[in-house]
Amino acid sequence: MLHRRPFVIAALALALLASCDTSDPTPPARWYYTCGDPVCSGPRPQPSVPACTVETPGQACASLGASCNPVDSCNRLVLCATSDPTQQGCPISRVRFKRDVEYLSGADLLRLHAELRRIPLATYRYREAGPSDRPHLGFIIEDVEPSLAVDAERDRVDLYAYASMTVAALQVQAQQLESLQRQVAALRQELAQRSGRRTTP
């Protein structure tokens, strides 16, 4: 039994270390930009929020929920949080934030459907990425511009517009499918009527 004692002691030590694990799975708090105005039109006063001093997006912060005003053209704030508040996008869709609203016609939907079908998809890596970084899937701006799906001033994709284009394509395809279903139903009815006439004595 003596020769087994070191293994027992080692097992007990590992169990003790596991029970003392105080690691916290919560991500560390950092400063993040919040969503700004739907259209960047210059800074405006926000007296209820203090001006930023040393708060820098990406750096660690101590007080969750704290915010400051960096005074930028989009009126974003800098917020202390454990995740990026803009990660899911920042669409502002209430009509009070918009003007010149024009709903798409059938011809507009067909045009967007055709444009979406022509977009060449590619996989790629960013130049600063490491050799082990995973590839991304998407399109190259130069392949499609000018397009509503492109935010040319910032050299990036307008994801909200891109997603709306896919909705337009789905609406067109749904209309086409419904039209085909009506045609099939009409053909079936016609065949049934012809078959009935042939079997009538």
Image: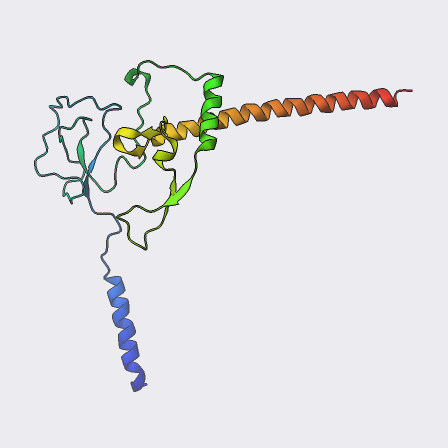
Furthest residue in direction bottom, as rendered: 2
Taking the view exactly as shown, the residue that stands out farthest to the left is 53
Outermost residue toward the front in this view: 142
In the picture, measured across the screen, residue 45 lies left or right of residue 170, that is left
Give percent across and percent down for residue 98.
30, 17
Marks counted in the figure total 0
Left-right relation of 52 to 18: left
Choose top left, top right, bottom left or bottom right for residue 55. Answer: top left
Q: Is residue 118 above or below residue 30?
A: above
Q: Is residue 84 above or below residue 162?
A: below
Q: Where is residue 107 shown, x and y percent of the image?
A: 48, 18
**Position of 157 relative to 109 (above/below):** below
Name the residue located 26 percent from the left edge and 51 percent from the top edge.
25
Q: Position of residue 4 (x, y in %)?
A: 31, 82
Quadrant of residue 63 in the image?
Answer: top left
Name the spot of residue 186 as percent of width and height, x first: 70, 21
Q: Residue at x 20, y 21 (%)?
A: 41
The answer to whether 1 is drawn above or below residue 79 in the figure is: below
**What residue do we see at 22% from left, 32% from top?**
34
Camera-side residue of 64 and 179: 179
Which part of the image, by quadrant, shows the N terminus? bottom left
State the residue in front, 131 or 22. 131
- Which corner quadrant of the image does residue 10 belong to? bottom left
Q: Which residue is at the front of the view, 108 or 37?
A: 108
Left or right position of 147 against 77? right
